[in-house]
Image (cartoon, rainbow, N blue to C red):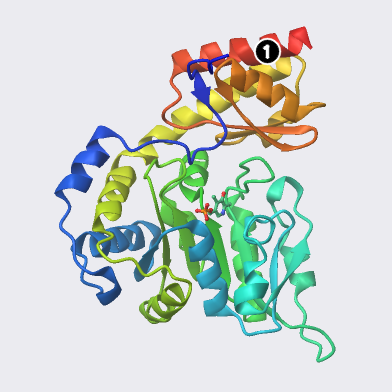
Amino acid sequence: MPPAPLIADLRSDTVTTPTPQMRAAMAAAAVGDDVYGEDPTVNALQQEVARLTGHEAGLFMPSGTMTNQVAIALHTQRGHEVICAEGSHIYEWELGMMAAFSGVVPRFVHAPLGIPDPEGVRAAVRRSIHQSPSGLISLENTHNKAGGTVIPLEVLAGIRAVADQEGLPLHLDGARVFNAAAALDVPLSDITGQFDTVSVCLSKGLGAPVGSVLVGSKAQMAQAHRYRKMMGGGMRQAGILAAAALVALQDGPALLKEDHRRARQLAEALAGAGFAVNLAAVQTNIIYATLPDAAAHAARWAAAGVHANALGPDSVRFVLHHQVTDEALERAIGVLTGAVVQA
Ligand SMILES: *Cc1c(COP(=O)(O)O)cnc(C)c1O
């Protein structure tokens, strides 16, 4: 049977394809050798992300895994612990790289809805000579595995205060920090300004084809440049990618609230059709639903043109992005809710 025509690809917000504006900007981009720091479009992108986040400097890299892992290398020494929320991407989905590259181990703090409590973070700090010392606190906002949840600003301020009192650096895995800013309706820098370094993905909801930017101080970015090269992330005429990312930065943020509205609409439709969805966790563009035989359901939906990610035996994830229109969403809801009724 030929595959059904695509209705909606809800597996991730990484599946978007470059817009015509991005393609045009890529074709016209001024470029140079970025390993020498000579690509004007990459330099413009780095400056723009630094400006928006309230940091001194930025460094463009191929992926968010690389920006996170370079940040961990910057802040830690071998044998350190990285304090992070349970379920953090830096551990769950970065293939043990914090151990493989930086020689550090995670120390998880309990984080209902992905939000650690400042006192829980303080209690995780270790200094005894009999234990591995804390080297870094790392947060994730929005928190992917918890359902795209947002850290309230007062919790952030509390954790910043703990970091200061304990003399620890604070990193943000901000793969979807633009979604957090949109959900809170605050300028991005209200969030990102609280951190020593921030990793920002341009290829998630903002829609760029490739890339993330790490921001921090000039001195940190000079050191990050070396770690990026060690990881094989030194790209040459990367301005063609940065050009698309600049368009994503320009056009992307304003579209996120619509993604959030559609996620809410889908979540409520799923809940209404009998799916187990924690509506309190649906704060941005991600929805997790619990249902038996998730993979079999996902395969059936895919055959009907709606793609979702079965991330566990009884867990399926839907992610909204700017290339799912209202009309496509209506049709997708028909397929998804119809399938449950038949089951
Ligand atoms: C997607 C993502 C990243 C980076 O992933 P890459 O695929 O390496 O770009 C990092 N953190 C979170 C929370 C993510 O969702």
In the displayed structure, would residue 186 be above or below residue 7?
Answer: below
Say whether residue 232 is left or right of residue 148: left
Where residue 305 appears, as percent x and y from the top left, is 55, 18
- Extreme front residue here? 1
In x, y percent, where is residue 65?
A: 53, 60
Q: Position of residue 247 (x, y in %)?
A: 27, 44
The answer to whether residue 128 is above or below residue 11 is: below
State which quadrant residue 135 falls in.
bottom right
Q: Which residue is mark 1?
A: 337
Residue shown at the point (52%, 45%) measured from the top left = 180
Q: Quadrant of the C terminus?
A: top right
Does any portion of residue 277 appear in the rendered image? no
Q: Nearer the viewer, residue 161 or 135?
A: 135
Which residue shows up at 51% across the image and 71% down it? Answer: 70
Q: Position of residue 303 (x, y in %)?
A: 60, 18
Can the viewer see residue 236 in this picture?
A: yes
Q: How many marks?
A: 1
The residue type indicated by label 1 comes to: Thr
Q: Which corner quadrant of the image does residue 207 belong to?
A: top left
Please rate how many residues cluster around mark 1, counting C-alpha atoms within 10 Å: few if below 14, some from 14 to 19, many from 20: some
User: What residue sits 70% from the left and 69% below the top?
Assistant: 83
Direction bottom: furthest residue = 129
Q: Is residue 16 above or below residue 336?
A: below
Name the secondary structure under disc 1.
helix
Residue at image position (64%, 19%) is: 301
Residue 292 falls left or right of residue 1: right
Q: Quadrant of the N terminus?
A: top right
**Is residue 227 placed above or below 67 in the rendered structure?**
below
In this view, the residue in front, 157 or 319, is 319
Q: Is the distance from the Cβ of mark 1 to the nearest ligand 1 atom less than 8 Å?
A: no
